[in-house]
Amino acid sequence: MKKTIKVPTDNGEYNFKLEELLEKKHISKNKLMRDIDTDFKVIQRLAKGTVTRVDIFVLARIFEYLDCDWSDIIEYKSNKKKKSN
């Protein structure tokens, strides 16, 4: 089941993919929260696309724990067309 949350912006959209990644790795948000010592609200905001600020130290713990990187959790797609040379 695809659980990517799309959040439109003026210039594109953010795709929040944490829930999808957790499901693929069979890890609950509660387990992630406990194992990386982070508040549940932080995990929930990253999963639901309601985050407004990102703590790089929390992200580092998530990356290490899930063996992933930024693009596995949050992706930005611009509406602008790429310029051709």
Image: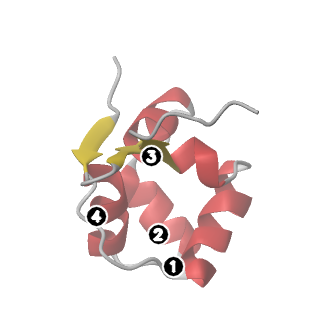
Which labelled disc corresponds to residue 34?
2
Quadrant location of the N terminus in the rendered image: top left
N-terminal-most mark, 4 or 1: 1
- Under mark 3, the amino acid is Leu
Q: Please tell me whether mark 4 sits on a helix, a strand or a loop.
A: helix
- In this image, 67 relative to 32: left or right? right
Q: Nearer the viewer, mark 4 or mark 1?
A: 4
The residue labelled by disc 4 is: 45
Q: CA distance from mark 4 to mark 3?
A: 10 Å
Q: CA distance from mark 4 to mark 2?
A: 16 Å
Callouts 1 and 2 close, C-beta under 8 Å: yes
> In the picture, residue 83 is in which quadrant?
top right
- In this image, 68 relative to 71: left or right? right
Which color mode does the image show?
Answer: secondary structure
The residue at 44%/46% (across/down) is 18
- 65 is higher (above) or lower (below) than 81: below
The residue labelled by disc 3 is: 18
- Under mark 2, the amino acid is Arg
Callouts 4 and 1 close, C-beta under 8 Å: no
- In this image, 81 relative to 45: left or right? right
Q: Residues within 10 Å of mark 1 (few under 14, many from 20)?
A: few
- Under mark 1, the amino acid is Asp
State the residue in front, 16 or 19: 16
